[in-house]
Amino acid sequence: MSRVLVLEAYRQTLTVIRSLAAAGWTPVLGHELGKEDDEYTAACRASRHLGGTVALPPSSAGTIYAHAVEEVLKNDSSIVAVLPVGEESLRSIMTREKEIRALRTLVAPSGATVSLCLDKPRANAAAAQAGLHVCDWKQVRDAQGFEKALAEVGYPLVVKPVDSFARVADRKALILDDAAERARLLPEWPGDAGILLVQSKSPGLRHNCMFHARGGKLTQRFESRVLRTDDPEGTGYGVESVSVALDPMRWKWVERFVQQLSFDGPGCVQFLVDGTRSDFLEINPRLDASVVLAWHCGVDLPASAVASAVSLDPSAVPVAAEYEPGRRLEWTLGDVAGALQALRARRSSLGETLRWLARAAVSSIWPSARMTWAWTDPRPTVLLATRFAGSILKVLVRR
């Protein structure tokens, strides 16, 4: 049976494993050497659908990581394709893109496309060129430029690192509604954050426009709205989402953007939507974390991406699936962890945390899909829940 090397263990990796197994592939997990017992690595290893594992260097190790993947492919002819799930493995793989593509099918956009997508200023410029609405933004490298950008962009605004792995004030992004909030949350230039993006704040909720494209043409589409995240300000990871009907205007923009980039592979364009207003947020050249909702709605993005990449016959590309709007995804463990983290960091009061936990409890009642749970494959979620409960117990005992 043909095997697919799936790189990196995240919560969405479980969906990738289940999707590929259901489509007749044998998923093999590439995980970090010595980290077999890490949270999501252990969860993926517990899946009944996993067909094997491969130990690799850290996914952030660049060419060292890429060379290790090359060696695996040279020594295992049963692997027909490589599917990077995380951004770090994707970046590292692209340091040896030509060599790896010469060995096997790489289920990912070209290195040039990946580079552009992961560079926020370049992605903003490309999105604007494709006709998407991009809020005013400035790229800053030092304290003087930071102060100038704050004045030019104006409040309310968002401050975020250009590098998606960097943090500003220990967060992915910082929302500053006025000068007083800036003085409280970010009184001086955060020199350890690297290059920053200062951008006008956009209202509305995040929409994930997930897709697969072949040769710059869309073959699969799915749209979801993020109702809540694990961050009080809404800048974190989604913990509750709902499927929505494809918006003609947003998808016209996505189609144009994908064609402009000659995009080939799985991806996701994110918008912040408020009524008829849709502001471009970012483009990810990989499967989105909420791909599980698409899969439960019948839009099988992981299997479609592999089937399309492996086949040279355009007629073999799966036809875009219809799906039902209003189906809901919840991530209870992430929801509760976010509430407790916000309380610990004093970004949420006790009353706000209790209301948050109550909302999480209500959301956990009969959703259409759960982030990691599957009745036919329960062990990964049982393992995750057991570990989470144990970590909370340890904190309580210490107190």
Image: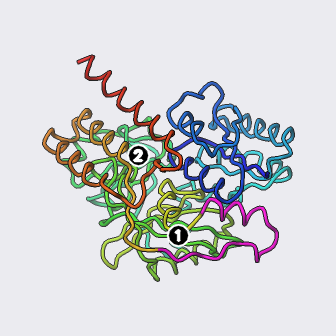
User: What's the residue at 80%, 38% (across, down)?
Assistant: 72
The magenta region covers 301-323
Residue bearing mark 2:
172
- Which is more N-terminal, label 1 or label 2? 1
Up the image or down, 367 lies above or below 174; here it is below
With 114 as the anchor, is 377 left or right in this view? left
**Residue topped by disc 1:** 127
The residue nearer to you, when weighing 33 against 14, is 14
Placement of the C terminus among the 4 image quadrants: top left
Local packing at callout 1 (Cα closer than 10 Å; few below 14, some 14-19, many 20+) is many
Q: Residue drawn 76% across and 77% down? A: 315
Choose top left, top right, bottom left or bottom right for residue 260: bottom right
Instruction: Identify which amino acid the numbered label 2 is placed on.
Output: Lys
Query: Of residues 151 and 241, which is closer to you in this image?
Result: 241
For this view, does 189 lie left or right of residue 382?
A: left
- C-alpha distance separating marks 2 and 1: 21 Å
Say left or right for 349 vs 115: left
